[in-house]
Image (spheres, helix red, strand yellow):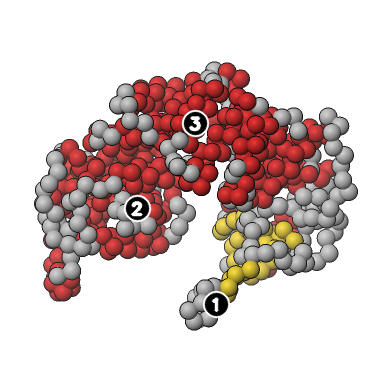
Amino acid sequence: MDEPARRLDEGALRALVPRVLAGLVRRGEDFDAAEDALQEAVLEALRVWPEHPPRDPRAWLATVATRRLVDARRSEAARHRREEATLAAPRPAATEEGDDTLFLLFCCCHPDLTPASQVALTLRAVGGLTTREIADAFYVPEATMAQRISRAKRALQGRRLDQPGDLAVVLRVLYLVYTAGHAGRVDLAGEVIRLARQLTLATEEPEARGLLALMLLNHARLPARLDPEGRIVTLDRQDRGLWDTREIAEGVRVLQSALAAARPGRYQIEAAIAALHDDAASAEETDWPQILAWYDDLVALTGDPVRQDPAAVLGRAVAVGHVLGAAAGLRETERLREVLAERHRWHAVRGHLHELDGDLPAAATAYADAARRATVVAERDHLVRQAARARAAGLLAGTVHPGAPRAGRSVGAGA
Amino acid sequence: MPKYLLLKHYRGGPEPHHPFPPMDQWAPEDVEAHMAFLKHVGELLEENGEYVDAQALTPVRTWVRYGGPDAAPVTTDGPLPETSDLVAGWYMIDVESHERAVELAAYVSSEPGPGGQPLYEWIDVREVMSGAPADD
């Protein structure tokens, strides 16, 4: 990106995108064409605004996008006429002006789309990111991401977009973006928190606020999650002075307002657990009994939690380990063996519980098993370190004897 | 400028220079030194303008083939003989010559192992075919 563009307030530009797009679609423009035209207007704005800032940015975007729409119609008039019969009828202006974000999120998170398409379309049409930025965030070529977006929009053609959508799908898509958003070059986590904040203005649903709170309360710990060398620092070893207290305060406030509605759901419960971690001045002061109580609520949300929500059962096992003892926690993980035994997190949790139990050789073995199944380089490296550390500490304590070295190869390449 | 893959293996290849245990059984400081070296290699390649890509693969492998008309794909992901090659990851580099690729591969192979001693790990160097014909 060139120097002037960096001085531009890109956040403010992005925030205008859903409002302008919703305006175009309500006026009767086709969603697909309007979204393409607006993307071109955004690229133009990134180029032009640093030198010539517009007096009314929103009107500027709407005007340029409209001009592009007219151009596109002229140049493709023949093709347009052929396809007209199959295009969706213009959407009626059914929703209020203030619901732009919600309206567009329902379009982009249409249940007929694949999760990857929902994510890509949401980031472009609602988040106002460029195709290149989205491609960079997910480490795929720009052409691949462009194709994914246009396929998603083709899949939406002929679908009715004026129906209230499925808010649960929207929340899941936003959370998916958030969890994917820490690795890339674009701050997706920050973007999706901004979207969730807009969403909470458009709906009273407490789960929307629960999700916003959950993301804020986790994001607040981000500065402490990696050390300067890029190594993972687990929650119990993090420098809590690095946590963002302003984000924690906002997260707690949002969570309290959600809980006041007395309609709990998974995001509110997970946010409550995150808040309890954030609230502890040191790892030793963590209120594990309270956390366990929230996990009890979380697993009670599904009829067969082991199969429907194994992640919640696994999280609960950690809490059980801290409240009732490591052996009890390990017994809890046994219930998940059939479902999760091939996943690295199950082995990592067992490593943690064995360590809590003082059984360092078993911890080392579990961490090594976890490392072999990890799919993120930083996590794999962390688990190899945990295994080596637990094994060395066990040797020092005289609890294991080193076996004859097995012939083997170094694990892993890559930076 | 030709591109090369420097492939690292979990197993396979010529007889190892010397046996060594899996990394999770090394002393913690040796693990740190090894990982720091690999990070340094990536940074060095970027600084040199020779870096294209670096990826690590999980050790889980599934062989797949067409199952025939109206049949599901045939897969084998069961344990394979210990002798079969298993790629662990690679650096892709864009360098002046084959000699430079060999030089860099040897440097990667000098990565520190247990006790800080070089691993002398075999690196598989493969030239990547160019996509476009030469313009002449």
Which structural element holds mark 2?
A: helix
Of mark 3 and mark 2, the one earlier in the sequence is 2
How far apart marks 1 and 3 lie (CA) works out to: 46 Å
Q: Which amino acid does label 2 sit on?
A: Gln
Disc 2 crowd, CA 10 A, few/some/many (<14, 14-19, 20+): many
Q: What residue type is labelled 3?
A: Asp
**The residue marked by circle 1 belongs to what chain?**
B
How far apart marks 1 and 2 lie (CA) works out to: 32 Å
Give the residue at mark 2.
A118
- What's the mark number on residue A296? 3
Residue B81 horizontal side relative to residue A112, left or right: right
Residue displayed at 80% across by 66% down: B14
The relative height of residue A50 versus residue B56 in the rendered view (above or below) is above
Q: Position of residue A347 (x, y in %)?
A: 65, 43
Which structural element holds mark 3?
A: helix
Q: Is residue A2 visible?
A: no
- What's the mark number on residue B67? 1
**The residue marked by circle 2 belongs to what chain?**
A
The reply to whether callout 1 and callout 2 are in contact (CB within 8 Å) is no
Residue displayed at 75% across by 67% down: B81
B31 or A100, which is in the foreground? A100
Q: Position of residue B25 (x, y in %)?
A: 78, 44
User: Exactly how many numbered labels are in the figure?
Assistant: 3
